[in-house]
Amino acid sequence: MPDKTTTETRLARAKFRGWHRGTREADYMIGGFFDRYHLSWGEDELAWFEMLLDEEDVDIMAWALKTQELPPHVAGPQMDLMMRLDYVDIPR
């Protein structure tokens, strides 16, 4: 089992990186995805999200919106969840 402190640190870093992408649209999509799903993540899901955070925002958004073909390294159950877009909450 992973060290709890290390996992907590990684989750905190992932949350920050998810919510501080540089554009409001990417923040809501990537940060919102983190907020909705991170509590159910194990090591594999967290590692996938950390890998995703290294991708360009325009690519992540295009994959989630299904306007760009998914590369094999991001395809899978996590991206399937991201493509639902049911986690995006834009405050008014």
Image: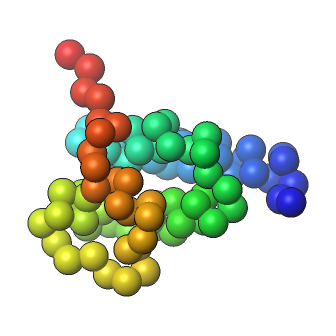
In which image quadrant can residue 24 be found? top left
Question: Is residue 19 placed above or below 51 in the rendered structure?
Answer: above
Q: How many marks?
A: 0
- Return the residue found at the far bottom: 72
- Regarding residue 57, the answer to whether it shows in the image is no
Q: Is residue 39 left or right of residue 76?
A: right
Give the x, y percent position of residue 68: 16, 72
Specify whether residue 75 is in view.
Answer: yes
The structure residue drawn at horizontal position 25% and vertical position 27%, both measured from the top left corner, is 90
Q: Based on the displayed image, in which of its 4 quarters is residue 54 positioned?
A: bottom left
- For the point 61% across and 40% down, the residue is 39
Q: Is residue 36 left or right of residue 26?
A: right
Residue 19: x %, y % from top left: 43, 40
Residue depicted at x 73% and y 47%:
9
- In the drawing, does residue 87 fall left or right of residue 5? left
> Is 92 situated above or below 70?
above
Q: Percent x, y for residue 1?
A: 86, 60
Query: Which residue occupies 74% across, 44% down?
Result: 8
Q: Residue furthest top?
A: 92
